[in-house]
Each structure stands twice: as C-alpha cells, then as structure tokens.
Image: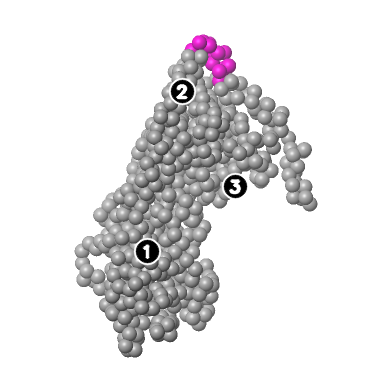
Amino acid sequence: MSIEADQGVYDYSTRPLRTPDPQGDPGLALADETRLNLYTRLQELRQLEKRAYDMFMQNLVKGTSHLSLGMEAVSAGFGEAMRADDYVFATYRGHAHTLSKGAPMDGVLAELLGRQNGLMGGKGGSMHLSDVARGMMGSYAIIGAHLTLANGTAWSAQLRDSGQVTVCYFGDGTTNIGAFHEALNFAAIWDLPVVFVCENNLYMEYTPVDFITAVDHPAADRASAYGLERIVIDGNDVDAVYDTALRVLERARSGGGPSLVEALTYRTGGHSRADPGKYRPADEVKAWAEYDPIVVYHQRLLARGFGEETLTEITNKVADRVDQATEAAKAGAEPELDSIFTDLWADGSSAWRN
Amino acid sequence: MAELSYRDAVSYGIAQEMRRDPNLVFLGEDVAAAGGVFKTTVGLLDEFGPKRVRDTPISEQAILGAAAGAAMTGVPVIAEIMFSDFLAVCFDLVANEIAKLRYMTDGQVSMPIVIRTANGAGSRFGAQHSQSVENWCMMIPGLKVVAPSTPEDVVGLMAASIRDPDPVVFFEHKSLMATKATIPDGEIVDELGKARILRAGSDITIVALALMVPRAMAAAERLAERGISAEVIDLRTLVPLDTQTILRSVERTGRLATVEENPRLCGWGAEIASLVAHEAFWSLDAPIVRITTPHIPLPAANNLEDATIPSIDKIVDTIVSEWA
C-alpha cells in the first residue's frame, strides 16, 4: 500500500494482489453427514442468492441488494456449528446469514419482492431481513451498531444462564467505526458469550480495505487491544470455518467469553447492485473465482470418496426448493396498505396522540 | 407519606420496579458503585447486586446496544446516559435501532427499554452539558418521551415507562434534583400520555415541561396580580401527546403560550402551536406565544445562562407584552 500524499490518491500500481492462499484439505475428523450438510448449506446459500440476483435483474426486486456470492462458506460453516436457539446478527449483506439460521427460502424471497408473505411483510426489505423466532435477530444497514446489539442478546443469555451464544457477522469496513471498538471492549470486560465474525472480503465498499486501515488484518490485528486471541481463517474453506466455529462457540458457551474471528474471503460481484466492481484487478478476481468455496468443497468431497451423483442429487434438490420458494414468494399478495400504520408500538398501533 | 427529593425519587422509582420485576436490569456509567454522578442511583447496587446494577465504560453506543439487544429477548432494561447531550454520540442506536426495530421487523420484537438521562440547564455547565434535547427524541417515530417535573411524577412515570413494552426516553431535569415533595405511601404507578392541569385559569393556557413547570406556575401567580387568570398544564409526556387536555383548555381560555427550555427551532411548542392553530383555531382570541431559549448554544456564566433560558420574569413579560 502506498498513498501519494501530495495528491491524496491511492496508488493501485504498487498494491500487491490479494489472492487466496489455499492450504488444501485440513483433514478434520468430520462425520460424512456433517460434510454433506455443509455442502447442502453452501448450495442453499449460493442458489438462493443467485435467484435473488436474477430477480433483481428482472426488475422484480426493487431497492438495492448486497450479495454474498463467493462468501457462502462463512455463514454455512457457522450455521452448521450453531445451536438452534443461538442468536445471529447480520449486516445489509445478510441474505445468506438469514438463511443459514433456518429462515425459510420463500419468506426471504417474498421479502425481497415486497410481498405480504415476506419475513417482515414487506416492511424490512433486502437490508433488514430478520426471523426472530429462529434466532435471526436482524440485518442492520448502518455499519457498527449491530455489534453492540449482539452484546445485548449475549448479556441476556448470560443473565438467564441459557447457554445461548450470539454470532455477529460484519464486513472488513466495519472495523474502522467506533461502535466496533466499543462493542469489543464491552464484550471482553463482561465476558459475554458472543462471537464476532469479520467477513474480510478485502474491499470496504469500493475501496481496498488495506488502503484505509492501519493494520494488515482489519479485525484480527485489533484483537490484542481487547485481550482476545488473534484468529485469521480461510473463509472460503467451509471445513476450516466449521472447525473454528465449533471451537469459539464452545468457548463462549462454557463461560470463556467473546471471540473475534477474521475470515478471509471475496465477493464475486461488486458491493451492491449499483456496483460492477471494476476497481478490482482482473488477476485478483480470477484467482478468487478459481478458489470458489463451492468448487473447493465439491472437489474435496469427491477426493474423499463421495459420489458425484450424491452431490448432484443435493444440488438438484436445493434447486427444486429454490424454484418452489420462488413460486411461493411470487404468489404472495402485496402488503395491505393498512400495515403501514401497524406495529410501531407494542399495542399494534402507530398513534402518537389522543 | 414521605418527603422525597426529585433526586431520591429516581432511585426510589427504580427500586420499586426492580423489587417488582426480578428480571429488570440497569446499566450505565458510574451508576452502581458511585451511585450516579447526580446521586440519583444511590443504594441500588447494595439492594440488587452487581448482576442487576452494572457499571459500564464510557461507551454510550455499547450501553444502548447492550440494553436494546437484551430488550429484544424480553429482558427489561434501564440504561442511563449520563447527560442528555451525550445522546448525540449514540443517536444511531436511539434513532435508527431502538426506535425502529419493532416496526422494521414487523412486530417480531418488543423494546422494553428506558433510557434515563439528565437534561437541561441551570448548572453553569456550558454548551455541552446543559441542553434540553427532548425535541431530538420527539421527532423520531417509535420513541416515547417523558419529562417529569415533580418527585411523585418521577416515581410514577418511571414505573409507567419501565412497564411499557416500548422504548421510552426519560428526561430528568438537573435543576429540579433538589426540589422536595411529599409522596404517598405504597406503589406509585402513573400513565404515559396524560398531561396535568396544575392550576385552573380562564384567560390563557400556559403549557410547560420539566423545569419550566414551576416557573410557569410562579409566572401564573404574578399574572394573577395583573388580573390575568392563567391555566397551567404540565405536559409530562411529549409522546404520546395529550392533545385533548391542551385543546379543551384552549377552548376555555382562548389563548395559548408554550414555555420551552429548548432552543427556538423545532421545539415541542412548535408542534403544539401547529396543533392548536389547526384544531382550536376558532377558539383563539390572540396569536399563540412561544417562550423559548433563543436559537443559540448555552453559555456558562451565571448571568448569561440565567438570561438565556426562560425565567419567571421573561414568561410574565412576554405574555403581558403580547396581550392585546
């Protein structure tokens, strides 16, 4: 990284490519069922996200979208490792995280379409997916605050001695806002059962995160400031994610306090619907495309003796479910206009006066 | 019957509710071991222990985030923001998260949280520790806003706020801390959204809030000496707003004055003036009068601060000078 101070611009020409560093099969002792579950989860997140993208391109979905294509291994690995009653918080890039906590596909797609059968009846949209009954405590569209909210559900679990752990996902860009630092210190001093998961996809919106961050690893290199272990993992290797998730979830569950995990990954596309991501070097994009988490895991499972037909069957079943969810979502009615005025207050109303 | 200061009424009210609800927890800066910088929370740590009464770092976002997250799971929380001016450093939590979460999740979560904060001028603290910022919160859909003026209201409205499943910002006025009153024995529980007519009158309705309430009452005495019969309403709650009490009063008196400690623009009195101008227009005999702090930050020196926020003299003089 270098900055031409007199011009105040970032110099891409001297920035080294940030390419993946494959370590191969970590050789974990996992049950076959677990491996197939992880593969199924990867397929679910990928195929639903692709469907969401297609519907945006067909102008069926309005507003904006922030896709997790290429980043699925992080939420797939954590999702498999979590308990059903654990809590999850996500950002505006939260479709995958919502699904990975068990939210129904049709509810997610219907919300993107702005339909009554959406998870929030059309009141939330792409950036605010939530499914509280399943522990998905929401997607938050302003960077930082949701890390502090995650402390709150973790505090609640601590107060109730419930053994629940909160997992809070965020991007690399979040590590440079004050709430990130407030939340980590607070979690550490209260020994809260919370796991902060930084999906470092190397770009803070349109800007390389290394250009605007004082340390190489935006999350992990801050861990020591809060007395936490420095953890950097391969976020495109779902086995590695799952293994780390089990470890940090157990630490939180057994009273060992918070963890901060930095998972290295890459967005297949741009930051949002409006962004083609042209600022990224072509060789970098290509290298990460070749290290796609589903391609990696597919090859690994074949090498481990799983049959191609087994994986194809999983893929096809997921495709059927995505098709069915799409039809169910599209079949939903538009929200009743009366719903505009409901549920501001707990009594169901929005009245501010008598 | 016991005599209680406004300051002690805070801990009295919190303790009443913490005894009732074993799940209720309280956090903030210096609230536990130190008993609060205004000594409003003395004794709570001793009675309820460190699990339920917790000190925090100077991290207002982390305080409100922890409170809101816990509230989302059904744990009722009281969070203290030491000075209301500091709401500005955590306003993302106040305005974008706490206020909106029920609505944007389509009712999937409740937010049983009370944000207590010390508000208002009179302590010579200058521009960053003296503001009246209740209007900052009034304008955000999803927040209830309370500002008591008496010890009994501190207790009763605190109980109502804590028992309310919606988020309440509870403004305690620094310059009322030393005021005392006798309060009844037993549990005290009030109701949000109810203004109170403190003094009946027939010539003008004066609507006031918090520290401006005793000043409006004193001004009404002085106006009576001049033959002007003033009705004084303590608003007590900005959201929900008790419009009926105001409108019925103006229909009787024909005149309205608001007494606001906030700076001029977008003070709560502007909303009430708008409401009365629209819904009680034909009852008005004279233009509506707003008495506010000028649209400036607050200065620190004794005489400068006193000259800035509405005084009894200023209330009387403004109403008399506008009398036509």
Discs 2 and 1 carry the same chain letter: no
Residue at image point 41% right, 37% down: A334
Q: Quadrant of the N terminus of chain A?
A: top right
Residue at image point 45% right, 54% down: B94
Name which residue type carries label 3: Asn
Q: Distance between the residues labelled 1 and 3?
A: 37 Å
Label 1: few (<14), some or many (≥20) within 10 Å? many
Discs 1 and 3 carry the same chain letter: no
Query: What residue did someone put label 2 on?
Result: A323
Discs 3 and 2 carry the same chain letter: yes
Q: Is any atom of residue B46 visible in this view?
A: no
Residue at image point 56% right, 22% down: A294
Could you tell me if the residues under marks 1 and 3 are in contact, i.e. CB atoms within 8 Å? no
Which residues lie in the magenta part?
A297-310
- Horizontal and vertical percent for residue B248? 29, 70
Tag nearer the camera, 1 or 3 = 1
Query: What residue did someone put label 3 on?
Result: A176
Q: Which chain carries label 3?
A: A
Name which residue type carries label 1: Leu
| Left or right: residue B213 compared with residue A59 | left
* First along the sequence among labels 3 and 2: 3
Q: Which chain carries label 1?
A: B
Query: What residue did someone put label 1 on?
Result: B238
Looking at the rendering, which quadrant does residue B198 occupy?
bottom left
Residue at image point 50% right, 15% down: A311
Q: In this view, does A250 lie above or below A207?
A: above
Q: Mark 2 lies on which chain?
A: A
Q: In this view, does A30 lie above or below B264?
A: above
Q: In this view, does B77 lie above or below B156?
A: above
Q: Is any atom of residue B226 visible in this view?
A: yes
